[in-house]
Amino acid sequence: MGRVNSKRRLATADWLGCSTTDPPSTPPHPPTKTTTSLRRSEATRSQSLTRLASPSGPDPPSRHPAPFSRTTTKDDPMPAPHKHPLITTRHDRPDLDLGDYTAAGHILWAALAAADITPNIEQTSAGRAIHIDLPNDTTVWITEDADISHLPTDHESWSALHFYDPTDSGNYVQVYLGPGGLTCEADTAACVSTIKAWIANYTTTGAVARHNTHLTLLRTSADPDAIRGSWRISYGQPGFDPTNPVHPTERHTATVIDRVITQPDRRGACLACNWEGPPRRDQNKAVEDALDHSHPGWRDLPTIPRGTGGKNVQRLRAYLDTTYPPDWFETGGPLKVFTTTANDRHEPGAARGGGYLVKVHRPSPAAGPQHEQQSLI
Ligand SMILES: [Zn+2]
């Protein structure tokens, strides 16, 4: 997953450094051979590396052609005129009749187009990949050991990598890795449905949409890295449901979404709209961003001591009713309480009305200045 170690990075760099007749213009070729080979036999690995080492031919006429026509017939799902020549060209198999030759890459290309995903093709002397351009200059690359031109009968498994950080080609997410043993058609279908769900999660915004696309991704053959790397509502936060789709709330409601790629990423989010806060490492910061969205002004409200009980409850309630805005708690507004615990997490659902209990750190009651609220207890 994610950032490769230095040894693997070196191997990738070596591969990228080989002489090219048509060097990659965007993210470099994915190190598919390394990843895929982890689940393969040595014999298969040798075959794959032999395939990778095959010399490429002259430059293709176009590197970014239009997608295939989706016109099909009963006898041939992809008539020859619509076959992409760069997928078909095989300099290591002169025995193949190119006019009749359907490569595994053709099947993948057609399946992506049928799923309303626009495929592109890239070639270096090291191999070829079908790639999908996504927002933020990121790209999903799909190959089988840097090859897409192999016969469907030779197909073992697709590997799809999302280079989500355009500034660091060593950072990527393994979105899909076929289990092997499937037909080319079955592996392609599983790969495409996984990529479609991944793209939906990556490109949508808002806690509800992110979480629901994450649930969809769970039902695909997504790699565990992709499951961890997809945005969803954080465990235990408002709206979190591990299995059922989430429905939007009527009023702006603070929550937190997260994903784990190289390390946890969090954002404040809202259950009513598609607002999302900036990336945060700290969960409390993400909650506070979300409260700025759902309940602006909360930072200016007074903080009260925690553990208030007995006869002071009525006094406290009366105090809050006069110092907090009307209907504050009824709309899920947060209650601010002091805590002596450093990095104490804000508690969802713990305030009157179901809002957050926001923890304000104060090392000890004696250490801090005397606040008006303290005199209440
Ligand atoms: Zn909102």
Image: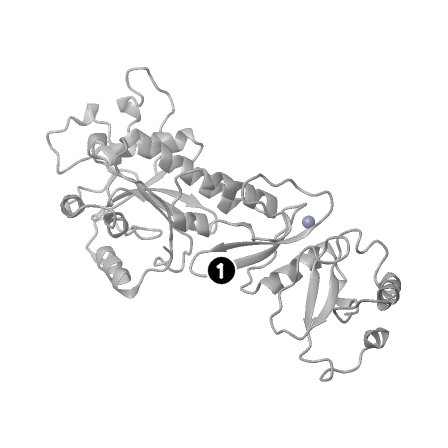
Give the image location of residue 132, x and y in percent: 39, 42
Q: Residue furthest front?
A: 310
Residue at mark 1: C-beta within 8 A of ligand 1: no
Give the image location of residue 341, x and y in percent: 63, 73
| Point 35% across, 51% down: residue | 26
Residue 93 horizontal side relative to residue 113, left or right: left
Give the image location of residue 82, x and y in percent: 31, 26
Residue 116 horizontal side relative to residue 327, left or right: left
Q: Residue furthest bottom?
A: 367
| Point 45% across, 32% down: residue | 116
Label 1 crowd (10 A; few <14 / some 14-19 / many >=20): some
Residue 206 appears in the rendering: no
Residue 250 appears in the rendering: yes
Name the image quarter holding residue 305.
bottom right
Name the image quarter holding residue 109.
top left
Q: Pick whichever, 113 or 338, lies toward us.
A: 338
| Point 80% across, 67% down: residue | 309
Viewport quadrant of the N terminus: bottom left
